[in-house]
Amino acid sequence: MGIIYFTFCFYSSANGASATKVDAICTYVNSSGAPRFDQVAFFKELANKTNGVTSLGIYSLDPNSLYVNGYSEAASKNPTTPINSFTVNVSITNLPYTSNMGTPNTSLFNSTRLIMNTVINSVVNQTTLNFFSPVCQTIRFSSANGARATKVDAICTYVNSSGAPRFDQVAFFKELANKTKGVTSLGIYSLDPNSLYVNGYNEAASVESPIEAATKVPVDAASSEEITLNVTILNLAYTSELASKYSLKYNSTSTNMLYLVNNLMKNSTLGSQLINCLLDSFVFNAVGTKVNLVCNIKKDATGLKFDAGAFYNEVSSMTLNVTKLSIYKLDANSLYVNGYNKAMATTTTKSPSLTTFRIFGPRQFFLNFTITNLNFNASLANKTSGPFIILKSKLDNLLNEGFKYNSRVKDNFEICEVIRLRSTPESVDTTVEAICTFNMNLLARTFTENDIQNSLLEITQNGTTLGNFTLSRSSIHVDVFRVDVTTTASSSITTTASAIIGNLPSSAFLGFNINFTILNNSVPDDPTKRQMLEEDITNKMNGLYQNSTLSKQFKYCLLSSIRNGSIIVSCNCYFQDDPVVNRKSVQDEFNQGSDRGRILGLIYPLKDITVTEIPRNYDLPFWAIILICLAVLLVLVLLFLIIFLLIYCLKGRRDSYDIHQNIYETYFPHLDMRKLY
């Protein structure tokens, strides 16, 4: 039958809680092309291997309890117990997978499972099985599409009391496909159209491959390598929707982009080596939208290394000198292949373009990059540990020396400091987060995020090395850094690099404090896990409003504090001053984006939601204070001049009089005409 993989089991009470019922899913790859799985024959094999369904290792079994895909000899002989079961597998594309979700009995697993059971049972009970009262239980969550999606495994059971014909998995597959709009939506979830399996049956799989389960063998990392592609699209304006992987615009644009890039790769000299291409992110660019992609290829059998320069020339030729990719117009100087760019390789990089200033004084930027030759470990997450302190000191020195002596922004550079070292998703590498400060004085013009990123690329050999460390170029990202002034001393500093677009004074925004309680959870004692929780809540709050009707007015959300009982969250969200933005509209959008205030980000169950407006801060900016001081000084100087002139004039008129005293001690001034001429 092929190789069998035990997948997962689910436990429930049986026989009045004096026994335990075990439900399990087994998957296998039918690589031998053998006949279709025969549940009756396999039942007999299992019965034989368990001594007539009486023992399983150290456990004693109920002889009448064994079912294989709903088949039981006891059930077939005894019409009073006609219990049938079947498996359902599907992948959800708008629910990113996390490790906690795959761990049974965690709060995240339990809350997600509760929601999933509800939506699956709702759909299954709309089918023809409704008459038999089916009950479905989710038993497992696993990673799909590189953790960008979540695979769900469920077991459904029903009582076939009417003695109807045997369960038809093909017919039921078609029913489920119809009820989920062609396998695209399941309640609040979006589905991968090719991911639905019923008892291992999938229409696409039945035609394309002999794989019985919704599991594919992972690519061997030792025989493959990654290629990073970066390009800027001129006729695709960047919007906040492109930052949210749950938005319609992100999904439609990414699907189109992946189709075009995969076709381009298939038609290149790497076509036979191509495994797949994945979209990493869309990033704001002053002239359009920057697209970051990662393609996996098989390593050359002859050992020949990938030539980034040669492939750059090939892609350039296929895109009309990097000007056009189907409907998209490209920035001719924006193509990078593994960090290689022909313009940068042959000429010096252009000076960073500077824009007119918006504020004066220090301005901070958040820097993020991944070190590929340093494996992450728990000690690097502890800011008091020796390894963290040593590595932080070395990275601080490298960044400060690079910006101070070798960058085009050195005249305005002040200091860089590493604030955190963390693990990299789906990798053993170490990701670095740092804050760099630049001084904006009266005569300087402010820098944009792109200017700082270009300078960072400049001091890291186009994003490849920093001292002895090798970097992943696609991981380099720079954003304006902002800390919420209302954050309490006990709470961690919260950065929202992905959400903040500009560093404008808070008086330009309408702020709202949103408080809520996350049920069935608690604040982790571990600082690293606490920080991860804070970042996750912050990202989900930003995603909620980025996909709301207030998205055009929305600026960013910052976590103010979290504390136990279950988890009490306080978050400040800021919006552009607009008549449509008020306390009611902000609360309505929060309720709309959290399933009527019941669950945040499809993960956190909520209660006790309150929204209050934050009093606006009308503090004057630094440049306004300087102008006021200059104006006051000018007024004082003018006042001094006026007083001086008055005294001088009065003194001149006093000298024009000759005063005489008479015998009665009375003084009469007499104008001396001689002194006037």
Image: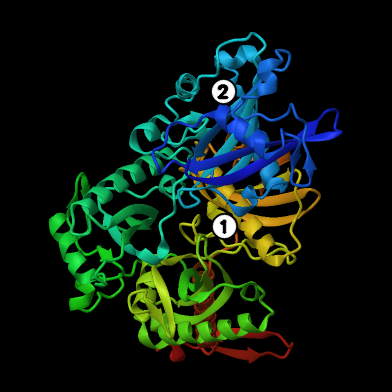
Q: Can residue 161 be seen here?
A: yes
Q: Quadrant of the rendered structure where residue 275 is? A: bottom left
For mark 1, what is the residue? 506
- 596, above or below 217, in the image: above
Residue 635's x, y, as percent?
Answer: 52, 73
Q: Label 2, on which residue? A: 123
Instruction: State the image coordinates of residue 600 (x, y, percent, origin top left).
Output: 63, 42
Is 443 placed above or below 72 here?
A: below
Q: Nearer the viewer, residue 247 or 206?
A: 206
Q: Foreground residue, 668 or 377? A: 377
Crowd band around label 1 with a 10 angstrom C-alpha radius: few (<14), some (14–19), many (20+): some
Q: Could you tell me if residue 596 is visible in this image?
A: no
Residue type indicated by callout 1: Ser
Task: Name the one closer to the observer, 290 or 438.
Answer: 290
Q: CA distance from mark 1 to mark 2?
A: 47 Å
Indicate the position of residue 76 as horizontal and vertical percent values: 65, 17
Q: Residue at x 41, y 63 (%)?
A: 221
The residue at the far top in this view is 162
How packed mark 2 is, by other alpha carbons closer than 10 Å (few <14, some 14-19, many 20 or more), is some
Horizontal arrangement in the rendering, residue 347 relative to residue 533 (left or right): left
- SS at mark 1 in the image: helix
| Identity of the residue drawn at 58% across and 16% down | 129
- The kind of residue on which mark 2 rests is Val
Front residue of 74 and 49? 49
Identify the image quadrant of residue 618: bottom right
Q: Mark 1 and 2 residues: CB-CB less than 8 Å, in contact?
A: no
Does dot 2 land on a helix, a strand or a loop? helix
